[in-house]
Image: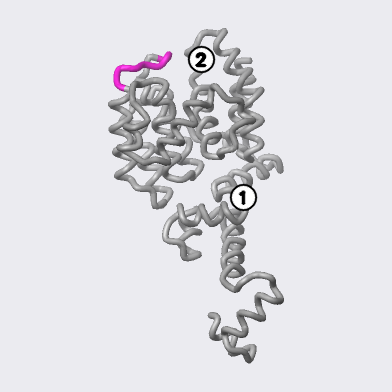
Amino acid sequence: MNLDYISKHAGYSKFYFARVFKQYIGLSIMVYVKRRKLTFASADLLNGDKIIEVALRYCYDSTSGFTKAFTKEFGFSPSMLKTMKLHFSVLGGNIHMSHIFLEKSDIHASKEELFAVLLKLIADSRSDYNVSLIEKTYVFACEAYKGIKRCSGDEYITHPINVAIILTFLEVPEDVIISGMMCDIFTKTIITADTIEREFSHDIKNLLLTLHKFDKLSLADIDDEDVLTIKLAERLHNMRTVEFMDKSVQQIKAKETLQFFVPFAAKLGNAKLTEELNDLALKFA
């Protein structure tokens, strides 16, 4: 049904009907329709539909446009709604522990193997991520982190790629995945903020700068959902490989995780991150 049909059915011109509608409902017809669409969209997300599917179903050209409208209306993103559902499912029981945690990559997988996993996840998600841009980010990050090793002896680039994989599981926006693949580039490399803005975008530069300042700020001072999600994904991968660090460092990381990261994962409603972070931290605390 459209406005012409409904107004004629009610016996009004569409312009008079629009005035009467706003007088009694308190919203313009367009605002009312947008809110109803987003309400139905939220129900579809809770039923397990993918964000890209829901965005297209309700006539959004991209997941980014849908995410912006959804976040503006409800105060949290579609991906956050999905993780909130996971949180409620875990609390309600009827779930085996093997399904609580996010899927894991091989701990010593090469950068090529991990990037193949990332591309498959993106393809399986049927999202509208810009694969060419993600491939460009991979090449750029590999060069930037070249020669740096992790405590495990693996190439350091495998860490940010793992972060990007975790973020893809969470169906976050494209810019967040790209930033995750360069999550500590200002700390570990000589790459500058100007280079990031030139090669990628102003938004990605700002997100990476906020991540860089993270250690100098308390978690309570950060209200950016994207920054917190990246830091949680980064901490999750670090805890998965914490066994390669000295015992004293393991204990410090474990206590930090229990004290700061687990509560914030829970606050964001992210059940899988919460459960696995808690499980890993208790093993090494």
Q: Which residue is drawn at the image coordinates 60% and 12% (left, top)?
A: 251
Residue, disc 2: 243
> Residue 183: horizontal and vertical position, in percent?
43, 29
Q: Which residue is drawn at the image coordinates 59% and 29% (left, top)?
A: 276
Crowding near the residue tagged with mark 2, few <14, some 14–19, many ≥20 C-alpha atoms within 10 Å: some
- Dominant secondary-structure state across the stretch colored magenta: loop
> Residue 173: horizontal and vertical position, in percent?
46, 45
Q: Tag 1: residue type?
A: Gly
Q: Is 164 drawn above or below residue 33 in the view shown?
A: above
Residue, disc 1: 75
In the rendered image, the residue lying farthest to the bottom is 11
Q: Is mark 2 on a helix, strand or loop?
A: helix
Crowding near the residue tagged with mark 1, few <14, some 14–19, many ≥20 C-alpha atoms within 10 Å: few
Residue 60 as seen in the image, left or right of residue 248: left
Q: Which residue is drawn at the image coordinates 61% and 85% (left, top)?
A: 16
Q: Which residue is drawn at the image coordinates 46% and 56% (left, top)?
A: 65
Residue 151 within the segment the image draws in magenta: yes
Q: Tag 2: residue type?
A: Glu
